[in-house]
Structure formats: structure tokens, C-alpha cells
Amino acid sequence: MAKLTVEIVTPEKRILSVQADEAIVPGGRGLFGVRPGHTPFLSLMEPGALTLIESGRRESYFVAGGFVEVGNDKVLVLADAAEPVTGIDVEGARRRMAEAQERMKGMSSEDARFELEQATVRREAARIGAANTARA
């Protein structure tokens, strides 16, 4: 049976290059699955869990947004940041989210930093969700 080659790359380094039966990606419009033979396309990624399935075994990585390119049985993930969900510091993510929420309290939505803080809240919430999914 054909396999996908999946690569996760961040600006700092290549996180992963493996073979998989399926990849489930947090796309800009929701989760989507990729299997060998998938139609080529490019998509925005939202922060969330990227799950790889190989021989029935699931392995998940948190991606902090970016882009994914699918084609020729290859999934190239260009992530702003990525880490195995098993290594997520949930308490640290909760702290960063709370700090961003606190900073937002004194801002209006017109403030230049408001969107940055809002993005931090979304990213850390997605990181916590990815970690909780892996532990379930």
C-alpha cells in the first residue's frame, strides 16, 4: 500500500520526516485528512494538533499555524512552531494565555497589540487542547 511522506518544518529546523498512512491537519477551514493519492493543494493551517496515523498508531504534534502543501503523496508542513503533544507544558501554556488575556483587558480592539494578544490566546488554547486530546 502507498504511503505518505510527511515533513514538519519550522523556521528553526526540520522537526520530522516520516512515512504515514494518513495525516489529519488543522486547516484554515477546519480539520482535513490526507491519504496517498490525495489531490494536490495548498492550505493555511490554524494552531492545533496535526495527527499522523501509521499502521493504526496515532502520533500528534502541535503546530502553531503556518501552511501545508499536499502533492505526489507528500505532505509538507511549514509551521510557525511545532512540538510533539506529549512534550507540551500545559501549565506554561495556561500561564501565557492568562497573561495575554490580562494584557487585553486594558486595550481596545483598535489597539495595535490587541490582535497579537488575541493570537496568543488562540494559540495557547489550541496548544492546551492538543495536549488534552493526547492525554484522553
Image: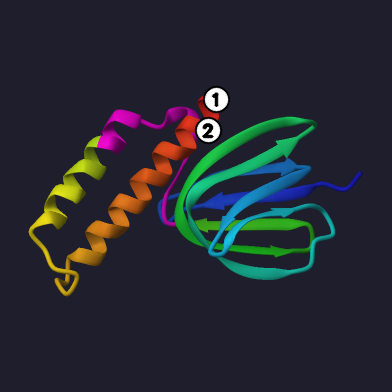
Q: Is residue 44 above or below residue 133?
A: below
Was residue 101 drawn as part of the magenta stretch in this picture? Answer: no
Residue at 68% over, 42% down: 18
The residue that disc 2 covers is: 133
Q: Are marks 2 and 1 in contact (CB under 8 Å)?
A: yes
Report if residue 56 is visible in the image.
yes
Residue sticking out furthest to the bottom: 110
Quadrant, the N terminus:
top right
- The Cα–Cα distance between marks 2 and 1, rounded to whole angstroms, is 5 Å
Residue type beneath disc 1: Ala
> What stretch of residues is rendered in magenta?
80-94
Residue at 19% over, 70% down: 109
Q: Which mark is residue 116?
A: none
Element marked by disc 1:
loop
Residue at 14% over, 48% down: 102
Element marked by disc 2:
helix
Q: Which mark is residue 136?
A: 1
Q: Position of residue 128 (x, y in %)?
A: 40, 37
Residue type beneath disc 2: Thr
Residue sticking out furthest to the left: 106
Q: Residues within 10 Å of mark 1 (few under 14, many from 20)?
A: few
Residue sticking out furthest to the right: 1
Q: Nearer the viewer, residue 68 or 106?
A: 106
Q: Position of residue 121 (x, y in %)?
A: 29, 51
Q: Position of residue 57 (x, y in %)?
A: 72, 29
Report if residue 84 is visible in the image.
no
Q: Position of residue 47 (x, y in %)?
A: 45, 53
Quadrant, the C terminus:
top right
Residue at 17% over, 65% down: 113
Q: Is residue 114 above or below residue 53?
A: below
